[in-house]
Image: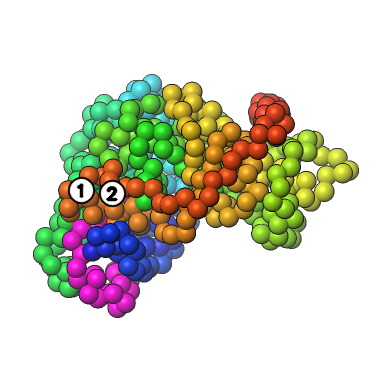
Amino acid sequence: MYLGLDLGTSGVKALLIDDSQRVVGSASGAMDVSRPHPGWSEQDPAHWIRATEEAIAGLKASHPKELAAVKGIGLSGHMHGATLLDDQDKVLRPCILWNDTRSAAQAAKLDADPQFRALTGNIVFPGFTAPKLVWVAENEPDIFAKVRWVLLPKDYLRLWLTGEHISEMSDSAGTSWLDTGKRAWSDILLSATGLERRQMPDLVEGTEQGGTLKGDLAAKWNMNANVVVAGGAGDNAASACGMGTVGEGHAFVSLGTSGVLFAANFSYLPNPESAVHAFCHALPNTWHQMGVILSATDALNWHSGVTGKSAADLTTELGDTLKAPSGVSFLPYLSGERTPHNDAAIRGVFAGLGHESSRVVLTQAVLEGVSFALRDSLEALKAAGTSLSRVTAIGGGSRSRYWLKSIATALDLPVDVPADGDFGAAFGAARLGLVAATKADPLKVFTAPATAETVQPDASLRGAYEDAYQRYRRLYPAIKSAAI
């Protein structure tokens, strides 16, 4: 058996798979996010341990024999968090999470230093780890002076599991301290934030061993000695391992609260000017690019709240037959936008409204707006040298047939819909545990799920969609200048 542990901001999921990668069981433990000030987002790392113990206790109660047969553990977790420890491994302050925006000024200052984009391949976003440490140095100098270790959230779990200070490439690429092309910490970037390499964990690949389970925990969970803990992955890279998105040109589109267009690469292809993330993948000599939009299903949920109709009812009103764009455009920038604009201040807009603009027309425009935002990410990936021939759709929004047809036509790519199953980050983490424990070929383990169906672009609407996309593209400069 192999155990995947996925640390999310709302809970920890533990998932067991067997040698044939069949999901045997899962359990979870819950936790909350603390927001002591506007724009702040923190968690006590002790809560991660408690939630993990709850999840594993659930598996021990429901699948004791299977849990006892675990040979490998894989880790996944939310990225960018700053977990600060002293020389006794004591937590110095609550972890500053990925969606904390307090360090916007520090991020802008670091991003103005050309070495950061040159070495990391990415913009220094406020959510990344490095600017958070600069904020701590400026606002909590007594704490900063005591920092012996900076760990990412899942790697604090690893410390508890193994006693080792270790991270891996995919998660570390989101810190703004990694030379992403060389897959190594950059002394130049660490020095620019007042830190040294000795304060960073050792690095392994996600598929490699990153410690072994401590004896007391193995005994507590009735496991054998020498259980291997894999390097693991950041949450999106772990999801990609679960989806089999690991080969050159393989890609998925995720329609969750936010939207992600994720593409795997066998070469390092940064394009920071377009706000595309270029990170290491969880496999050796593999990278990935990611376009991120901040409001995907969030945009439809906002529209649902305004109209008083459920998201499901709104999409049902559209039917299954894709319609030509009406002339009403929607920009889904309800909380700013990441790719391609890197604009936290911009906000959304409807344009082209008329007396004839019914609720159905507005719903159609919302779905098209998200589709066109994903097209922006596709164009950014193309500009960075990545060519895609198809994508796989995951996330709650992918349940809408109309939305899938809109995305396929906006991207002009076939969209594969996977058969039912659990292919998320916990499953990808379990796969990483399997590879690390057995030395299996990752490309043979990280296979794609069966495709239930493929949604093709509507060739008859290709021209109308292209015209609507160009209209959508012209709106951002107009509303940006109006906002200024």
Q: Quadrant of residue 46?
A: bottom left
Amino acid type for the residue under numbered disc 2? Val
Can residue 255 be seen here? The reply is yes
Of labels 2 and 1, earlier in sequence is: 1
Q: Is residue 81 found inside the magenta-colored segment of the image?
A: no
Residue drawn at (34%, 52%) of the image:
428
Residue 3 relative to residue 405: left or right: left
Find numbered disc 1 in the image and state the secondary structure of the residue it sits on: loop
Task: List the residue tagged with mark 1.
Answer: 440
Q: In this orientation, which residue lies closer to the viewer: 350 or 370?
A: 370
Residue 131: x and y, percent? 38, 37
Task: List the residue tagged with mark 2.
Answer: 445
Residue drawn at (73%, 51%) of the image:
318
Can residue 134 be seen here? The reply is no
Question: Hey, which residue is sitting farthest right in the picture?
Answer: 355
Say if 34 sits above or below 184 in the image: below
Residue 229 relative to residue 95: left or right: left
User: Magenta span covers which residues?
Assistant: 52-77
Residue 17: x and y, percent? 29, 62
Residue drawn at (30%, 64%) of the image:
16
Say if 220 sits above or below 102 in the image: below
Would you say the residues marked 2 and 1 are in contact, meaning their CB atoms lie under 8 Å apart? yes
| Residue at mark 2 to residue at mark 1: CA–CA distance | 7 Å
Q: Is residue 70 found inside the magenta-colored segment of the image?
A: yes
- Count residues near mark 1 (Cα–Cα under 10 Å), then give few for <14, some for 14-19, many for 20+: few
Find numbered disc 2 in the image and state the secondary structure of the residue it sits on: helix
